[in-house]
Image: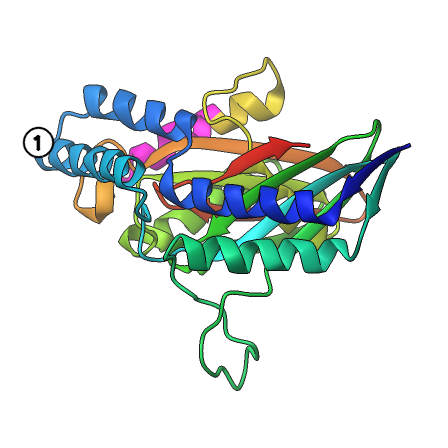
Protein backbone atom coordinates (compact mmCIF):
# COMPACT_ATOMS: atom_id res chain seq x y z
CA UNK A 1 0.00 0.00 0.00
CA UNK A 2 1.39 3.39 -1.05
CA UNK A 3 0.48 6.49 0.95
CA UNK A 4 -0.24 9.73 -0.90
CA UNK A 5 -0.79 12.91 1.11
CA UNK A 6 -3.73 15.16 0.28
CA UNK A 7 -1.30 18.10 0.18
CA UNK A 8 0.44 16.47 -2.81
CA UNK A 9 -2.94 16.08 -4.53
CA UNK A 10 -3.84 19.72 -3.81
CA UNK A 11 -0.54 21.01 -5.23
CA UNK A 12 -0.94 18.80 -8.29
CA UNK A 13 -4.40 20.24 -8.95
CA UNK A 14 -3.04 23.81 -8.55
CA UNK A 15 -0.44 23.03 -11.22
CA UNK A 16 -2.91 21.35 -13.58
CA UNK A 17 -5.58 24.05 -13.22
CA UNK A 18 -3.13 26.67 -14.45
CA UNK A 19 -1.47 24.54 -17.11
CA UNK A 20 -4.84 23.58 -18.61
CA UNK A 21 -5.89 27.23 -18.88
CA UNK A 22 -2.55 28.59 -20.12
CA UNK A 23 -1.34 25.86 -22.48
CA UNK A 24 -3.39 24.54 -25.39
CA UNK A 25 -3.25 20.76 -25.60
CA UNK A 26 -0.51 19.63 -28.04
CA UNK A 27 -2.93 17.53 -30.11
CA UNK A 28 -5.32 20.50 -30.44
CA UNK A 29 -2.40 22.74 -31.44
CA UNK A 30 -1.27 20.22 -34.05
CA UNK A 31 -4.81 19.86 -35.42
CA UNK A 32 -5.15 23.64 -35.76
CA UNK A 33 -1.81 23.90 -37.59
CA UNK A 34 -2.91 21.15 -39.99
CA UNK A 35 -6.28 22.86 -40.49
CA UNK A 36 -4.53 26.13 -41.32
CA UNK A 37 -2.48 24.40 -44.03
CA UNK A 38 -5.51 22.72 -45.55
CA UNK A 39 -8.03 25.57 -45.28
CA UNK A 40 -8.88 27.25 -48.61
CA UNK A 41 -11.07 30.09 -47.34
CA UNK A 42 -8.91 33.20 -46.85
CA UNK A 43 -10.94 34.59 -43.95
CA UNK A 44 -10.99 31.20 -42.24
CA UNK A 45 -7.20 31.02 -42.56
CA UNK A 46 -6.86 34.42 -40.87
CA UNK A 47 -9.06 33.28 -37.99
CA UNK A 48 -7.14 30.02 -37.55
CA UNK A 49 -3.89 31.97 -37.48
CA UNK A 50 -5.35 34.32 -34.86
CA UNK A 51 -6.37 31.31 -32.74
CA UNK A 52 -2.84 29.93 -32.93
CA UNK A 53 -1.32 33.33 -32.13
CA UNK A 54 -3.62 33.60 -29.13
CA UNK A 55 -2.50 30.18 -27.88
CA UNK A 56 1.17 31.13 -28.31
CA UNK A 57 0.76 34.36 -26.34
CA UNK A 58 -1.27 32.64 -23.62
CA UNK A 59 1.48 30.09 -23.07
CA UNK A 60 4.38 32.56 -23.14
CA UNK A 61 2.70 35.16 -20.91
CA UNK A 62 0.79 32.74 -18.65
CA UNK A 63 -2.58 34.16 -19.60
CA UNK A 64 -5.89 32.37 -20.00
CA UNK A 65 -6.39 31.00 -23.51
CA UNK A 66 -10.05 32.04 -23.20
CA UNK A 67 -11.77 34.49 -20.86
CA UNK A 68 -14.23 31.70 -19.99
CA UNK A 69 -12.02 29.58 -17.76
CA UNK A 70 -14.91 27.18 -17.42
CA UNK A 71 -16.35 24.94 -14.79
CA UNK A 72 -13.38 22.70 -13.90
CA UNK A 73 -14.11 19.01 -14.45
CA UNK A 74 -11.59 16.83 -12.60
CA UNK A 75 -11.09 13.16 -13.50
CA UNK A 76 -9.30 11.12 -10.82
CA UNK A 77 -8.11 7.55 -11.41
CA UNK A 78 -7.17 6.09 -8.03
CA UNK A 79 -5.02 2.98 -7.84
CA UNK A 80 -6.63 0.46 -5.50
CA UNK A 81 -3.31 0.04 -3.69
CA UNK A 82 -2.99 3.78 -2.98
CA UNK A 83 -3.98 5.21 0.40
CA UNK A 84 -4.99 8.88 0.54
CA UNK A 85 -3.77 10.29 3.84
CA UNK A 86 -4.13 13.52 5.77
CA UNK A 87 -7.63 14.63 4.88
CA UNK A 88 -10.42 14.62 2.33
CA UNK A 89 -9.75 13.94 -1.35
CA UNK A 90 -12.69 16.13 -2.38
CA UNK A 91 -11.54 19.04 -0.20
CA UNK A 92 -7.97 18.73 -1.52
CA UNK A 93 -9.16 18.89 -5.13
CA UNK A 94 -11.54 21.79 -4.46
CA UNK A 95 -8.83 23.70 -2.59
CA UNK A 96 -6.40 23.04 -5.44
CA UNK A 97 -8.84 24.49 -7.96
CA UNK A 98 -9.48 27.53 -5.74
CA UNK A 99 -5.79 28.30 -5.22
CA UNK A 100 -4.84 27.49 -8.80
CA UNK A 101 -7.44 29.84 -10.22
CA UNK A 102 -6.68 32.68 -7.79
CA UNK A 103 -2.91 32.41 -8.28
CA UNK A 104 -3.37 32.22 -12.06
CA UNK A 105 -5.72 35.24 -12.18
CA UNK A 106 -8.37 33.03 -13.76
CA UNK A 107 -12.05 33.95 -13.81
CA UNK A 108 -14.46 32.70 -11.16
CA UNK A 109 -17.45 31.38 -13.10
CA UNK A 110 -19.41 29.15 -10.69
CA UNK A 111 -22.65 30.14 -8.96
CA UNK A 112 -23.49 28.29 -5.76
CA UNK A 113 -27.16 27.80 -6.52
CA UNK A 114 -28.22 26.94 -10.09
CA UNK A 115 -31.62 28.63 -9.61
CA UNK A 116 -30.97 31.56 -7.28
CA UNK A 117 -27.55 32.14 -8.88
CA UNK A 118 -25.64 34.66 -6.67
CA UNK A 119 -22.10 35.99 -6.89
CA UNK A 120 -19.65 33.82 -8.87
CA UNK A 121 -16.95 31.84 -7.12
CA UNK A 122 -14.21 29.33 -7.98
CA UNK A 123 -15.62 26.11 -6.56
CA UNK A 124 -16.89 23.43 -6.33
CA UNK A 125 -15.51 21.62 -9.38
CA UNK A 126 -17.11 18.54 -10.90
CA UNK A 127 -15.18 15.45 -9.74
CA UNK A 128 -15.32 12.02 -11.38
CA UNK A 129 -13.45 9.21 -9.61
CA UNK A 130 -12.55 5.76 -10.88
CA UNK A 131 -10.76 2.89 -9.14
CA UNK A 132 -7.94 1.41 -11.21
CA UNK A 133 -5.19 -1.19 -10.64
CA UNK A 134 -1.89 -0.14 -9.08
CA UNK A 135 -0.76 2.38 -6.47
CA UNK A 136 -0.71 5.64 -8.39
CA UNK A 137 -3.24 8.44 -8.83
CA UNK A 138 -3.88 10.02 -12.22
CA UNK A 139 -5.49 13.47 -12.21
CA UNK A 140 -6.85 15.33 -15.23
CA UNK A 141 -8.27 18.85 -15.08
CA UNK A 142 -10.63 19.82 -17.92
CA UNK A 143 -11.86 23.45 -17.69
CA UNK A 144 -15.17 23.30 -19.60
CA UNK A 145 -16.40 26.59 -21.02
CA UNK A 146 -20.14 26.89 -21.28
CA UNK A 147 -20.46 28.45 -24.72
CA UNK A 148 -19.86 24.93 -26.02
CA UNK A 149 -21.17 22.96 -23.03
CA UNK A 150 -24.58 24.60 -23.49
CA UNK A 151 -24.82 23.07 -26.96
CA UNK A 152 -24.35 19.47 -25.83
CA UNK A 153 -27.25 17.04 -26.17
CA UNK A 154 -28.31 13.47 -25.37
CA UNK A 155 -30.90 11.29 -27.07
CA UNK A 156 -32.37 7.92 -26.12
CA UNK A 157 -32.65 6.01 -29.39
CA UNK A 158 -34.73 2.97 -30.11
CA UNK A 159 -32.21 0.08 -30.22
CA UNK A 160 -33.35 -0.86 -33.72
CA UNK A 161 -32.10 2.37 -35.34
CA UNK A 162 -29.24 2.19 -37.81
CA UNK A 163 -25.90 3.98 -37.69
CA UNK A 164 -27.12 6.56 -40.22
CA UNK A 165 -29.76 7.80 -37.76
CA UNK A 166 -27.11 8.24 -35.09
CA UNK A 167 -24.91 10.15 -37.56
CA UNK A 168 -27.82 12.45 -38.40
CA UNK A 169 -28.34 13.22 -34.72
CA UNK A 170 -24.68 14.06 -34.15
CA UNK A 171 -24.63 16.23 -37.26
CA UNK A 172 -27.80 18.05 -36.15
CA UNK A 173 -26.28 18.79 -32.72
CA UNK A 174 -23.21 20.34 -34.32
CA UNK A 175 -25.28 22.24 -36.87
CA UNK A 176 -27.48 23.65 -34.11
CA UNK A 177 -24.41 24.72 -32.14
CA UNK A 178 -23.24 26.74 -35.14
CA UNK A 179 -21.11 29.81 -34.37
CA UNK A 180 -22.32 30.05 -30.75
CA UNK A 181 -19.94 27.34 -29.54
CA UNK A 182 -16.78 28.92 -31.04
CA UNK A 183 -15.79 26.54 -33.85
CA UNK A 184 -13.67 24.76 -34.94
CA UNK A 185 -14.98 22.12 -32.57
CA UNK A 186 -13.77 18.89 -31.10
CA UNK A 187 -16.79 16.61 -30.75
CA UNK A 188 -17.01 13.94 -28.06
CA UNK A 189 -19.63 11.22 -28.51
CA UNK A 190 -20.75 8.69 -25.91
CA UNK A 191 -22.76 5.66 -27.00
CA UNK A 192 -24.19 3.09 -24.60
CA UNK A 193 -24.57 2.64 -20.87
CA UNK A 194 -27.38 4.62 -19.27
CA UNK A 195 -28.49 8.16 -20.11
CA UNK A 196 -26.14 9.71 -17.53
CA UNK A 197 -23.24 7.39 -18.37
CA UNK A 198 -23.47 8.20 -22.08
CA UNK A 199 -23.02 11.86 -21.15
CA UNK A 200 -19.93 11.00 -19.10
CA UNK A 201 -18.55 8.92 -21.98
CA UNK A 202 -19.01 11.88 -24.33
CA UNK A 203 -17.01 14.14 -22.03
CA UNK A 204 -14.32 11.51 -21.52
CA UNK A 205 -14.07 11.22 -25.30
CA UNK A 206 -12.77 14.80 -25.33
CA UNK A 207 -9.78 13.67 -23.27
CA UNK A 208 -8.60 11.32 -26.03
CA UNK A 209 -5.98 12.45 -28.49
CA UNK A 210 -7.73 14.09 -31.46
CA UNK A 211 -5.49 12.36 -33.97
CA UNK A 212 -5.69 8.98 -32.26
CA UNK A 213 -6.89 6.43 -34.75
CA UNK A 214 -7.76 2.79 -34.46
CA UNK A 215 -9.10 0.33 -36.98
CA UNK A 216 -12.58 -0.03 -35.60
CA UNK A 217 -16.18 0.64 -36.53
CA UNK A 218 -16.48 3.65 -34.23
CA UNK A 219 -13.31 5.21 -35.64
CA UNK A 220 -14.63 4.88 -39.17
CA UNK A 221 -17.95 6.40 -38.07
CA UNK A 222 -16.06 9.28 -36.47
CA UNK A 223 -14.13 9.95 -39.67
CA UNK A 224 -17.33 9.91 -41.72
CA UNK A 225 -19.05 12.33 -39.35
CA UNK A 226 -16.01 14.63 -39.38
CA UNK A 227 -16.23 14.93 -43.17
CA UNK A 228 -19.95 15.68 -43.00
CA UNK A 229 -19.48 18.31 -40.29
CA UNK A 230 -16.75 20.07 -42.26
CA UNK A 231 -19.06 20.15 -45.27
CA UNK A 232 -21.52 22.33 -43.30
CA UNK A 233 -19.43 25.44 -44.11
CA UNK A 234 -19.85 26.85 -40.59
CA UNK A 235 -16.11 27.39 -40.46
CA UNK A 236 -13.86 28.98 -37.84
CA UNK A 237 -15.91 31.22 -35.54
CA UNK A 238 -18.92 30.60 -37.78
CA UNK A 239 -17.73 32.76 -40.68
CA UNK A 240 -17.43 30.03 -43.29
CA UNK A 241 -14.71 27.67 -44.41
CA UNK A 242 -13.69 24.03 -44.51
CA UNK A 243 -12.70 23.79 -40.84
CA UNK A 244 -15.79 23.45 -38.67
CA UNK A 245 -14.46 20.48 -36.69
CA UNK A 246 -10.96 19.28 -35.79
CA UNK A 247 -11.93 15.80 -34.71
CA UNK A 248 -14.71 13.44 -33.60
CA UNK A 249 -13.92 11.02 -30.76
CA UNK A 250 -16.37 8.27 -29.84
CA UNK A 251 -16.47 6.22 -26.63
CA UNK A 252 -18.81 3.22 -26.25
CA UNK A 253 -20.02 1.04 -23.40
CA UNK A 254 -22.37 -1.97 -23.16
CA UNK A 255 -26.03 -1.04 -22.75
CA UNK A 256 -29.46 -2.57 -22.09
CA UNK A 257 -31.22 -4.60 -24.79
CA UNK A 258 -34.05 -2.04 -24.79
CA UNK A 259 -31.94 1.10 -25.14
CA UNK A 260 -29.35 3.00 -27.14
CA UNK A 261 -28.29 6.25 -25.44
CA UNK A 262 -26.21 8.67 -27.54
CA UNK A 263 -24.69 11.81 -26.05
CA UNK A 264 -22.77 14.58 -27.82
CA UNK A 265 -20.44 16.87 -25.90
CA UNK A 266 -18.95 19.75 -27.87
CA UNK A 267 -15.68 21.50 -27.13
CA UNK A 268 -14.71 24.79 -28.71
CA UNK A 269 -11.31 25.16 -30.39
CA UNK A 270 -9.78 25.85 -26.95
CA UNK A 271 -9.77 22.21 -25.89
CA UNK A 272 -8.00 22.56 -22.56
CA UNK A 273 -6.93 19.67 -20.37
CA UNK A 274 -3.85 18.79 -18.33
CA UNK A 275 -2.91 15.46 -16.77
CA UNK A 276 -0.39 14.26 -14.20
CA UNK A 277 0.28 10.92 -12.52
CA UNK A 278 1.44 10.96 -8.87
Whether residue 120 is visible: yes
Residue 201 location (% of width, % of height): 64, 42
Mark 1 neighbour density, 10 Å: few (under 14) some (14–19) many (20 or more): few
123 or 151, which is in the foreground? 123
Q: Quadrant of residue 127?
A: bottom right
Q: Residue 186 sits in which quadrant?
A: top left
In the picture, measured across the screen, residue 278 lies left or right of residue 203, that is: right
What x and y, as percent, mark residue 120? Answer: 45, 74
Could you say where residue 261 lies in the image, as x and y percent from the top left? 67, 48
Residue shown at 22% from the left, 48% from the top: 238
Q: Quadrant of the C terminus?
A: top right
Q: Does the magenta segment cover residue 274?
A: no
Q: Please give the name of the residue rendered at 69% of the width and 43% of the height, measured from the top-left corner.
A: 76
Quarter of the image containing the N terminus? Answer: top right
**Magenta residues, start to end:** 223-233
Residue 125 vs 232, above or below: the answer is below
Mark 1 lies on residue: 42
* Magenta stretch contains residue 231: yes
Q: Residue furthest bottom?
A: 116
In this view, the residue in front, 47 or 224, is: 47
Q: Nearer the viewer, residue 113 or 214?
A: 113
Please provide percent x and percent y for residue 96. Answer: 58, 53
Dominant secondary structure of the residues highlighted in magenta in the image: helix
Amino acid sequence: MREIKVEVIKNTVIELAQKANFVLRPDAQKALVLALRQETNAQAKRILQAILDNARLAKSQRLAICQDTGLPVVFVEIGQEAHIAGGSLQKAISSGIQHGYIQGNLRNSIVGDPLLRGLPRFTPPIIHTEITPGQKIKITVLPKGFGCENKSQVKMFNPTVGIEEIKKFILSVVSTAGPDACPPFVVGVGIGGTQDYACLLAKKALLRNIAHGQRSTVHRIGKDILKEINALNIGPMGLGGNTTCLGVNIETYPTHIAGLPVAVNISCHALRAATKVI
